[in-house]
Image: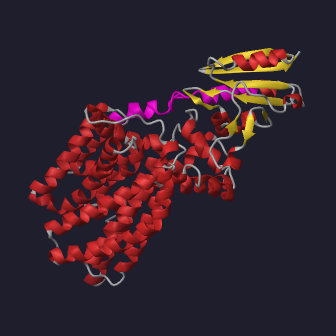
Amino acid sequence: MSAPPPAVDDRPAATAAVDRPAVHRRRTALAAALVGVFAFAVSVTGSWIPSAWADEAATMSAARRSLPELWHMVHHVDAVHGLYYAMMHVWFEVVPYSVFTLRLPSAIAVGLAAAVTVLLGARLVGPWTGIVAGVVYAVLPRVTWAGTEGRSYAATTLFAVVLSLVLVVAVQHTAERRRRAWAWWVLYGVAVLCCGLLFVDMLLLVVAHGVTLLVGILLGGGPGGRRSHVRTALWWLVPTVVAGALLLPFVRLASGEADQQLYYMGRMGWGPGIVKLVFLQQFFAGTKAMAAVAWLLVAVGAVGAVVVPRLRDRIPAVALTLPAVFLPPAVVYVASVLVRPLFNPRYFTFETPLVAIAIALGLTVLPWRRTAVLGLALLVLLAVPQWGAQRIPTAKDASTWGPATALLERERAAEPAGTRDGVVYGPLPSHVNRTTEFVAASYPRAFRGMHDLTLERSAVDIGQLWAQRRPASGPLSGLTRVDRVWFVGEPTADEPRLLQRRLTAAGWRVAGQWQQGAFRLIEFERR
């Protein structure tokens, strides 16, 4: 049997030409979706293994409040994370709480951000570069850490790449004088507002966008020349100024709370420490080999766009990524040295999609896809050890909260029915100026039904993340209403020594004690 004759496309050539971009868009969208699924899988796998830690406990302390209570809290502390806390409050209205569900939104945000990174890279350079950028983003150590963290950092990457994509589309529509280009600038202003509310440092990305547009004015290329770039910059300025004015009260509120939130930061100065923080820790979590390869690729991609004629159309991509990657940390580091410490490498997680595109520009400099695949494989291999280290039980601040609370839950389950338990929250391991109320916020089931014996005023009443408590030498409230007392915390010079002395004098004895990592768990019962 002979093969059937090939089908003949008898449509008008104009119709076929219209269909080609549509097919191109569908394929890019499919590629973005697949890369997004891959990124989600990379982040979510093993995310339930590490014990929760102090920052995630803050999320749970805030998210379990009602929205009016949360509104009251952010006027006293942590306004910078208020929008994230509100989103997590809504999330836990829908799903039951566990350490896994606490971190699941971050993995979802990583998947979505990877998909949008593909779309942004495709619009700036082409689909292949976009796909490479999405995969790079998915395996960056800073991203695989954020994807297993019950904090806002993964969400900041999604907001940042969406903001950058909206900017690129708005600029292109303005340059082409499309009728509804203004709508994209309105959307850009809304996105700026959302980014600022999610995390104040993200406003530096907006400043970086301004630098990108300034570069366009100085170069003056493209249709319409310099005049077109000036017109675009003016369009950018309007929604940016409006959003900035609307955000000003929030920025003032958040900055006024900085002292009580950043008290742990030490003095910063000039020296080799800058290189370690910015070039090693910031995006690569200390993975030296990966950092060296990645920064080399960033340089290759930027230089190649300038000096290789066939790559000149990549200059807008370089102009977008480099200011976004370098300007925010530079501004914050200078402020940290000259004014007060503000710099923390994880605060710049929002830059990772732009970092990934900058790396992808280097990986795709050569016209052969095989070289890009090999380079991408190398980066993935270099990232694997860090990915594994982020998924061991003690990966987060050496936390052993999970095993300690499992032990407490097991011992309480063995108590006679109707036993009334009281708890004394001792010093938090590694943070002796805090109490294990942090642990109870993260693992509430283990502490369910326990009477808090040192509580003076609840966190909700005082609008803080944590309650106001009596010192170790203070009285215990409600001691007569409990049958057992549990001490949970790290031993210090005063605790649990003073507690044990007081309870012994009141007719109690030690019924059992356990050590789990830095935790001491002591059970007291009446004689």
Q: Is residue 350 left or right of residue 147?
A: left
Colouring rule applied to residues: secondary structure
In this picture, is 175 found above or below 12? Answer: above
Q: Is residue 34 visible?
A: no
Residue 510: image location, x then y, percent? 79, 15
The magenta region covers 382-410
Which residue appears at 50% of the width and 60% of the height?
250
Q: Quadrant of the N terminus?
A: bottom left
Q: Is residue 394 magenta?
A: yes
Dividing the picture into quadrants, the one containing residue 307 is bottom left
Q: Quadrant of the C terminus?
A: top right
Name the residue nearer the viewer: 265 or 514: 265
Name the residue nearer the viewer: 29 or 288: 288
Which residue appears at 19% of the width and 63% of the height?
215
Report the magenta stretch's main SS.
helix
Q: Is residue 424 left or right of residue 84?
A: right
Residue 254: image location, x then y, percent? 50, 54
Residue 358: image location, x then y, percent? 26, 51
Which residue appears at 19% of the width and 50% of the height?
301
Q: Is residue 184 magenta?
A: no
The tally of labels here is: 0
Name the residue nearer the viewer: 168 or 466: 466
Name the residue nearer the viewer: 138 or 222: 222
Which residue appears at 65% of the width and 17% of the height?
515
Q: Is residue 234 visible?
A: yes
Residue 381: image location, x then y, percent? 34, 34
